[in-house]
């Protein structure tokens, strides 16, 4: 899988499927630019005769028509992690990435104020444009920083796929263009790479992730990452699997269980990192999904 974030999703799905005695087939599209691949996989699952589909859509609106078509076949589709526009989605297990971005922005505003800064420069790397979650995280961040009493300048916003090469290149280019950056805020892949890229640039920027991964968890522990909101990815996946089972048992979303739900979002920093175990956030250390 492309990054450790989705390994945690995989662990949550597989462990809950095992607990509930559900047969699970996993399909991985290979990145946010591969919408056609994901749609082919959805059609393949329908052809296999699956009872339901849990979808981590790689596009906010690009899967609307295919979800509608799957729904007409009587197959429920539960969205997990990424939000989706599709009106025919059966249920959603996710957190608001607007809230995730807001919490990251709130941390930056409070930290800058605590340090007595009157003006700060920020580079933001949301993730893939039009993915939904990346756009929402940037909007939420902007809303929170409006409350900073000083001047907060987002000098660069760099959109791109969450591959290590894409994010590393985007951040290096931004730091070369803007030599006085106080905070680098971004998706977890960008945040993981940021300490090394910042060091090479000769700057001294603080790093905040818009969500958490094992690398950021370790970075917070060792002081290279200042903070990151935790969307409790394993729990989101387990909730999605539970929703699917309840749908297949003829329970109704919005009546027997919420149509949309998700875990509460803590912001992890050096001050509270010990309150959240690695296993709770990501599953057992060393876990890795293997694809056939």
Image: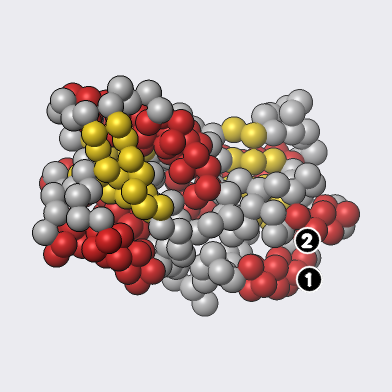
Residue 107: which quarter of the image? top left
Tell me the element at label 2. helix
- Please indicate whether residue 19 sits to the left or right of residue 78 in the image: left
Percent position of residue 223, x then y: 14, 44
Camera-side residue: 163 or 255?
163
Q: How many marks?
A: 2
User: Neighbour class for label 2 at 10 Å: few (<14), some, many (≥20)?
Assistant: some
Question: Which label's residue is closer to the chain start, 1 or 2?
Answer: 1
**Could you say which disc has been placed on residue 66 in the image?**
2
State whether residue 274 appears in this view.
no
What residue is at 67 percent from the left and 72 percent from the top?
36
- Please indicate whether residue 269 sits to the left or right of residue 102 in the image: left
Q: Is residue 261 above or below residue 53?
A: above
Dot 1 and dot 2 residues touching (CB under 8 Å)? no
Residue 276: which quarter of the image? top left
Camera-side residue: 288 or 110?
110
Percent position of residue 151, x then y: 30, 31
State whether residue 114 appears in this view.
yes
**Could you say which disc has been placed on residue 47 in the image?**
1
What residue is at 59 percent from the left and 71 percent from the top?
34
- Please indicate whether residue 17 sits to the left or right of residue 243 in the image: left
Tell me the element at label 1. helix
What residue is at 79 percent from the left and 47 percent from the top?
88
What residue is at 70 percent from the left and 68 percent from the top?
39
Q: How is the image coloured?
A: secondary structure
């Amino acid at each position: 899988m492309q990054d450790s974030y989705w390994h945690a999703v995989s662990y949550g799905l597989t462990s809950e499927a095992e607990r509930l005695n559900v047969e699970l087939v996993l399909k991985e599209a290979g990145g946010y630019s591969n919408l056609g691949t994901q749609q082919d996989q959805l059609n393949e699952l329908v052809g296999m005769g699956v009872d339901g589909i849990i979808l981590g859509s790689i596009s906010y609106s690009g899967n609307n028509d295919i979800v509608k078509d799957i729904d007409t076949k009587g197959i429920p589709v539960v969205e997990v992690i990424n939000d989706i526009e599709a009106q025919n989605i059966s249920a959603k297990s996710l957190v608001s990435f607007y809230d995730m971005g807001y919490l990251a922005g709130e941390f930056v505003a409070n930290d800058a104020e605590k340090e007595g800064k009157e003006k700060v420069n920020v580079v933001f790397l949301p993730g893939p444009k039009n993915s939904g979650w990346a756009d929402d995280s940037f909007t939420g961040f902007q809303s929170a920083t409006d409350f900073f009493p000083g001047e907060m300048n987002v000098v660069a916003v760099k959109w791109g796929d969450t591959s290590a090469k894409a994010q590393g290149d985007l951040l290096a280019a931004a730091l070369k263009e803007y030599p006085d950056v106080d905070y680098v805020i971004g998706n977890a892949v960008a945040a993981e790479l940021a300490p090394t890229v910042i060091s090479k640039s000769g700057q001294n920027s603080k790093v905040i992730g818009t969500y958490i991964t094992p690398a950021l968890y370790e970075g917070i522990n060792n002081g290279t990452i200042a903070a990151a909101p935790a969307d409790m990815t394993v729990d989101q996946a387990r909730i999605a699997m539970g929703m699917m089972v309840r749908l297949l048992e003829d329970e109704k979303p919005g009546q027997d269980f919420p149509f949309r739900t998700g875990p509460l979002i803590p912001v992890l920093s050096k001050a509270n990192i010990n309150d959240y175990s690695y296993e709770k956030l990501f599953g057992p250390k060393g876990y890795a999904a293997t694809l056939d």
